[in-house]
Image (tube, rainbow, N blue to C red):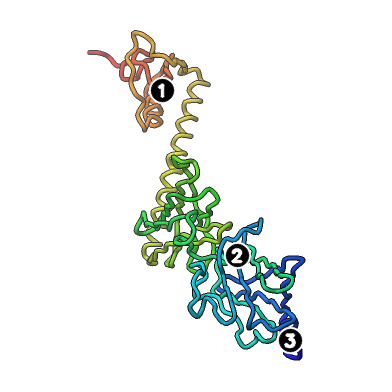
Amino acid sequence: MFGVGLQFLFLLTCGVTLGQEDGSVRVVVLEGGEALFPVSINMGAERLLFDWRKVGPGGEVFQEVFMYDAGIHYNNGRSGQSPQFKGRVSHFPAELKHGNASIVISNTTATDRGNYTCYFPRLQPPQTFYFELDVDLHFKDRSGEDPAATPKPSVTTLTVDWALLHCEVPGASLNTKAEWQSGDGNRLEAEEKRVPEKDHDHVFISLSVNVTRTDLYRCVVSQEDIKHRVSAQTFVFISEKQKMECKECYSMLMVGITSFVLGAVNLAAVLALLVFAKCIKILHNKDSALKGEEEINLPSNGTNILVKMLQSCHCSQLSISVTSDVKVCEQPEFVCEDSLADPS
């Protein structure tokens, strides 16, 4: 009895609740850790039979975990243990005489979750102790253990200098999250597209991001429900010279855009001035140009041509037909200074 008292004291000191017949004891363990199922009876157990099983909600036997029968058990030659538990279950031989029938399941996985019983059929009356095991999972690659795990992504670098990185995830589950991360693990703002696949249970994910500095970049794919995470990475080197060249290209592009916008504004202003002075007339014709009038496309430097024409010509009326392009009719009524000269 003194040994049993010590065993109870040890279990209570460790914060462990003993198995009960009238209720289920919940055991929580980190994935990969050891799960202790504590059972102690008020007599020696070395000559007894006790059977640990993983059971379903209705008590049906799913798997044989550990059976001990008067010194013969699964770890010394007895057959019948479920393959999932082979080599992972141990007991306390030296403590059997104190009634300790506890077991330890090592290297716990998500598939170990569930309900367990410890059954003593030869006790009078027979006794059964109940447990529930919960394995607290952490993120890792579960491609080989869970069919719902999303495949590993693939990454490519689309540009050499000002790098555009692209990540593709085919066959992703609907709850899959994908993101680009920098070398220090910070999330990067990226453009994401999701396209449903034929089975409608999976999607094709594409993720693009622009990066501007040398670093190791990762495309990380995660599934919260099964704690699945895979990634692919690529190293990008961007020199200071490339940064300056890209900044210059950007500046030139902005100057070009600004010049184009200002030119368009100037042209619009000149046309508005001519309309206001009743020197030209704007005709809106969506279908076709006016009959009998030969159309001439207004060139890109139309502003300069109109200014020069106004300087040299006294126009009474100039018709402009606006279809898809701005067009000038060939038969306006205007008198140029050159035409006033003596024909002889």
Q: In the rendered image, which quarter contains the N terminus?
A: bottom right
Q: Residue at x 58, y 73 (%)?
A: 67
Q: Nearer the viewer, residue 50 or 257?
A: 50
Q: Which residue is mark 3?
A: 4
Find the distance from the CA under tag 1 to the CA under tag 3: 98 Å
What amino acid is found at the position of numbered circle 1 in the picture?
Answer: Ser
SS of the residue under disc 3:
helix
Q: Residue at x 54, y 74 (%)?
A: 107
Count of residue discs: 3
Q: Nearer the viewer, residue 278 or 50?
A: 50
Find the distance from the CA under tag 2 to the CA under tag 3: 27 Å
Find the distance from the CA under tag 2 to the CA under tag 1: 78 Å
Q: Position of residue 32 (x, y in %)?
A: 55, 73
The furthest residue to the top: 292
Q: Which residue is mark 2?
A: 54
Q: Earlier in the sequence, mark 2 or mark 3?
A: 3
Q: Earlier in the sequence, mark 2 or mark 1?
A: 2
Q: Is residue 318 left or right of residue 115?
A: left
Q: Earlier in the sequence, mark 1 or mark 3?
A: 3
What amino acid is found at the position of numbered circle 3 in the picture?
Answer: Val
How busy is the neighbourhood of tag 2: few (under 14 within 10 Å), some, or many (20 plus)? many
SS of the residue under disc 2:
strand
Disc number lying in front (2 or 1): 2
Q: Which residue is mark 1?
A: 324
What amino acid is found at the position of numbered circle 2 in the picture?
Answer: Lys
Q: Residue at x 31, y 16 (%)?
A: 339
Disc number lying in front (1 or 3): 3
